[in-house]
Image (spheres, rainbow, N blue to C red):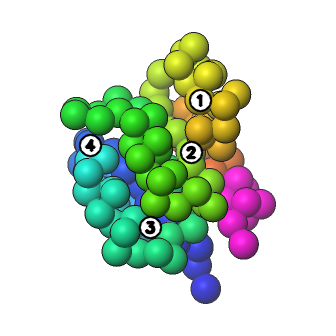
Amino acid sequence: MLAKILYIDDEYPNRIMFKLAYRGELDVILAKSADEALTLLKENPDIEIVITDMRMPKKDGLQLVSEARLLNDKIPYCLLTGFGVTPEIQNALDSKLIDQYFKKPFEKDQILNYIKKNVA
């Protein structure tokens, strides 16, 4: 059975590229906003990992993770962003708000290896 992950990015091409990259290897659910992601987390309690973009309209990735952890604090939350590790992101890593940081463009095997090691 494939690991079920939720990927959030406000840019359509990024969502499709991510889903296609892991076709046959992961069960990827897509969301285009933080609010949609929160709804999907409520509707899909079997989601095993969340990977989110940082910069999105209304709520950024860290705001999303803060709210999502109230729904499910037992799964890994990861940030995938084109930005380097800012003080804000470093603080989120240090405080364990996020479990992992990945840089865009993403390396398929890096994310897949992380998921294999951290998802039951």
Residue bearing the label numbered 1: 92
At label 1, the amino acid type is Ala
- N-terminal of the pair, mark 1 or mark 3, is 3
Q: Distance between the residues labelled 3 and 4?
A: 15 Å
Within-10-Å neighbours for mark 1: few <14, some 14–19, many 20+: some
Label 4: state its secondary structure. Answer: loop
Residue bearing the label numbered 4: 10
Using the image, tell me which numbered label, if any, was put on residue 78: 2
Label 2: state its secondary structure. Answer: strand
Label 3: state its secondary structure. Answer: strand
Quadrant of the snapshot with the N terminus: bottom right
Q: How far apart are marks 1 and 3 (CA)?
A: 24 Å
Q: Distance between the residues labelled 1 and 2?
A: 10 Å
Residue projecting furthest to the right: 117
* Residue located 59% across and 40% down the image: 98
Give percent across and percent down for residue 7.
42, 55
Q: How far apart are marks 2 and 3 (CA)?
A: 14 Å
Label 1: state its secondary structure. Answer: helix
At label 4, the amino acid type is Asp
Residue bearing the label numbered 3: 28
Give percent across and percent down for residue 69.
51, 51
82 shown above or below 28: above
The answer to whether residue 34 of the structure is visible from this angle is yes
* Residue span colored magenta: 113-120
- N-terminal of the pair, mark 3 or mark 4, is 4
User: 41 or 14: which is nearer to us?
Assistant: 41
Query: Which dot, 4 or 1, sits closer to the camera?
Result: 1
* Residue located 70% across and 28% down the image: 94
At label 2, the amino acid type is Cys
Give percent across and percent down for residue 99.
65, 43
In the shown orientation, is residue 24 left or right of residue 15?
right
- N-terminal of the pair, mark 4 or mark 1, is 4
